[in-house]
Image (cartoon, rainbow, N blue to C red):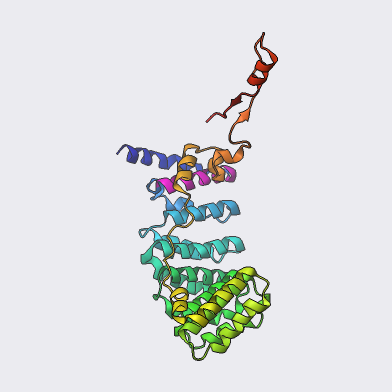
Amino acid sequence: EFVTNISKKLSPPLVTLLSSEPEVQYVALRNINLIIQKRPDILKQEMKVFFVKYNDPIYIKLEKLDIMIRLTSQANIAQVLSELKEYSTEVDVDFVRKSVRAIGRCAIKVEQSAERCVSTLLDLIQTKVNYVVQEAVVVIKDIFRKYPNKYESIIGTLCENLDTLDEPEARASMIWIIGEYAERIDNADDLLESFLDNFNDENPQVQLQLLTAIVKLFLKRPTDTQELVQQVLSLATQDSENPDLRDRGFIYWRLLSTDPAAAKEVVLAEKPLIAEETDLLEPTLLDELICHIASLASVYHKPPTAFVEGKVGLKKMLPARAGDTDSEQEAAGATIIPEPG
């Protein structure tokens, strides 16, 4: 009861700080970010104060966005999604990207809202704005990982935008989706083969994902994809200078040639669901930062020791007493005084 009363009293002053100038707002937001990780109930009724204003600097916008996601619940998800969709049409590219990712985080955090989030992402894909489409594909991959076999009906729409994807993360995400649901995509082999034309010029992230996706496709449809898997294994093991790609290629090749059943168990194994909040601070670090609220540590989200060199202890010379011999003075001089705290 005491904690509840204190929490109620904390809310108004924190909200008041958000009407200050941007620099003070930023410091307040960084501290609020810590507080709501420890006690989310403090500001759960104050979602609207974190809505972004058109004239907020970008560093304020991004902090507000992060806090909005932390405060999102089933009760306010409709309001939050409406705001995020609005933000996704702004002109600031970085902010738009973060807003699209935030929609995906909402879907993962509030299961009841997942369908609405997917629908919102599909609306954004229809805008055909390149960077919006790319971010949407990345977050949809995460939604597929959180809710497997639930939203495959949208794969066709994603495949229509395959040619517009030019960023490594978006291309790798799309390849993962094709490989994961290869048995439900009639032309999966053609789609994956289209990436092989420039295999050596692709980003390593894309190459690794393409190798795994084609091996998955082969294990699901071995009769008509043998040539394709031979081609990608050859590219990965003979033409590549990337040791990670070569090693993975050799492992797959050895598995497929010696024990296809074991290859199925390894490559097609059931994957763990992704966590709701992957960006929360470690509990021990969070407790330490909470103890240093309103200091540099709570703004940078780093422990105080990270700002001080020589963390173990400082050698400080104690003044020599009159009458001490040389050896006694040396011993006194070597005394180590540990740092306070």
Q: Quadrant of residue 230?
A: bottom right
Residue 2 position, x and y percent, is 32, 37
| Location of residue 114 with respect to 320 vertically, above or below | below
Image mark count: 0
Residue 190: horizontal and vertical position, in percent?
56, 87
Q: Which residues are magenta?
A: 22-39
Whether residue 63 appears in magenta in the rendering, the answer is: no
Instruction: Determine which quarter of the picture holds residue 111.
Output: bottom left
Chief secondary structure of the magenta portion:
helix
Residue at figure coordinates x 34%, y 39% from the top left: 3
| 18 is higher (above) or lower (below) than 191 | above
Q: Residue furthest bottom?
A: 224
Of residue 110 and residue 214, the one placed in the foreground of this image is 214
Q: Residue at x 52, y 82 (%)?
A: 257
Residue drawn at 59 percent across, 31 percent down: 313
Residue at horizontal 40%, vertical 63%?
Answer: 78
Of all residues shown, which one is farthest toward the top?
Answer: 323
Residue 160 vs residue 255, the one in the foreground: 255
Of residues 96 and 249, the one nearer the viewer is 249
Residue 102 screen position, x and y as percent: 49, 62
Between 108 and 269, the one lying in front of the other is 269
Q: Is residue 116 left or right of 297 when viewed as pictured?
A: left
Considering the image in quadrants, where does the N terminus appear? top left
Can residue 158 be seen? no
Is residue 37 a member of the stretch shown in magenta? Answer: yes
Name the side, left or right, on which 36 lies relative to 100.
Answer: left
Can the viewer see residue 225? yes
x, y (%) of residue 14? 46, 42
